[in-house]
Image (cartoon, helix red, strand yellow):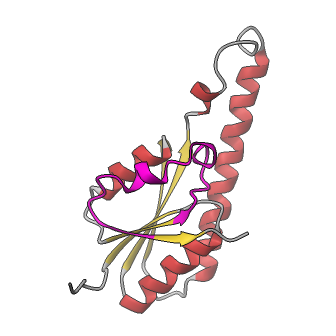
Amino acid sequence: MFMAAPKNILLLLDEDSSATAEAVRVAQQNSAQLTALFVLDSTWNDYVGHDWLSGSGSRADFIDYVQQQEEKSAEKAFARLKSLADKSLNIQCITKVGNVVDQAHQEMQNGYDLLVASNPLRRGLERIRGNLAALCEKAPCRILLVPAGD
């Protein structure tokens, strides 16, 4: 079966540059639009629970710390993407807050031909959850999984 070249690519940005480099390569090769999605994982609040941290400022401080680290990771990921791409590549950068897989599914509904993501996902709590299957399930477009670098 013949697959048309992708013209509208979604990159699920994470801490791995292998998927970023591959998305740039595919976009440049096909003169495609590249949209980079970085999801600030907001599910840490549920993950850390409400036990010993509940009665102190430690829990709130931890959540604030994680949020700051997420924002720094987003800045670094976008900068890395832009350093890999030449000026002719049309890149749109999007930041969303929420569950990584849920936000990726929501964004995929916007008419992409291809999703590029790391295998395994290295974004927020997806490092722990290992929800690559959940990302692929019911995807409305083709998915290119790029082995994560070291």
Please tell me whether residue 58 is drawn above or below residue 77 in the rendered image: above
Q: Specify the quadrant of the image occupied by residue 116.
A: bottom left
66 sits left or right of 85 in the view: right
Magenta-drawn stretch contains 45: no
Please tell me whether residue 33 is drawn above or below residue 111 in the rendered image: below
Residue closest to the far left = 1
Q: Specify the quadrant of the image occupied by residue 16.
A: bottom right
Magenta-drawn stretch contains 134: yes
| Quadrant including the C terminus | bottom right
Please tell me whether residue 127 is drawn above or below residue 14 in the rendered image: above
Please tell me whether residue 59 is drawn above or below residue 29 in the rendered image: above
Tell me what residue is drawn at x 70 percent, y 38 percent: 66
Residue closest to the far bottom = 29
Q: Specify the quadrant of the image occupied by residue 42.
A: top right
Q: Position of residue 11 (x, y in %)?
A: 46, 67
89 sits left or right of 121 in the view: left
Tell me what residue is drawn at x 25 percent, y 64 percent: 111
Magenta-tinted stretch: 118-144
Tell me what residue is drawn at x 42 percent, y 83 percent: 27
Q: Could you say which is closer to the camera, residue 95 or residue 116?
A: 116
Q: Position of residue 115 (x, y in %)?
A: 39, 67
Tell me what residue is drawn at x 55 percent, y 83 percent: 85
64 sits left or right of 33 in the view: right
Q: Position of residue 135 (x, y in %)?
A: 42, 53
Q: Position of residue 98 (x, y in %)?
A: 48, 39
Number of numbered callouts drawn:
0
| Quadrant including the N terminus | bottom left
59 sits left or right of 128 in the view: right
